[in-house]
Image: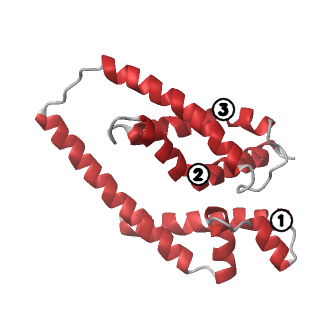
Amino acid sequence: MDKSNSQDDRYQRFVGLLALNDQAIRRFIRSLLPSTEGVDDVVQETALECWRKFSDFELGDTDHPDQTQGSDEFIRWACVIARFKVMSCQRDWARDRLVFREHIIERLAEDAFEQIENRDLERMAVEDCLSQLVVESRRLLLSVYRPGDSVKRIARESGEKSRRLYRKMNGLRKQLLNCVERRLAEES
């Protein structure tokens, strides 16, 4: 198998597992912190560390090519990483006595509002581009993000091979990305 294709498959599997379990990992992290402050930072640090160590997870889990399988193992593994990230962040926060001046906070808020507006434009572009796909293509593309739905299940229902559907899904993702980039370029 082509190394870059293998890396793409690995990335797709990671993103699928992370998307499927993101809220559970977030709830776990929230339960370890005294307040909601810092939850997003720890979630992000956890996701980055999970990606860095994903090959270690895959070594013990090679018989699950489908994103929804291996989900229980993934969440347990990710929560162990999250626990260490929470402890590390709490140590850092205890040492950090940084207080921002008011004008810096205002500048950060302006930047945050810009990012929110950009995300709204991106979301609308994705929704618009998804709506242009035929129903079967849209279902295939979104199957990895819906609980209880999967490429494997669609393959069984349609009588097609899973590998073929994965290739088709990768093509649809590229098509969706191109469409979204066009829409965003038109907006700017």
* Residue that appears at 83% across and 43% down: 62
Under circle 3, the secondary element is loop
Q: Residue furthest top?
A: 95
Q: For the residue carrying disc 2, how many other residues have a C-alpha within 10 Å: few (<14), some (14-19), or many (20+)?
A: some
- Report the amino acid beneath label 2: Asn
- Foreground mark, 2 or 1, reads 2
Which residue is label 3 attached to?
A: 53
* Residue that appears at 69% across and 50% down: 71
For marks 2 and 3 on the same chain, the one whose residue lies earlier in the sequence: 2
Residue placed most toward the observer, 135 or 121:
135
58 displayed left or right of 178: right
Under circle 1, the secondary element is helix
Quarter of the rendering occupied by the C terminus: bottom left
Which residue is label 2 attached to?
A: 21
- Residue 162 is tagged as 1
- Residue 182 is tagged as none
- Report the amino acid beneath label 3: Lys
| Measured Cα–Cα span from mark 2 to mark 1 | 23 Å
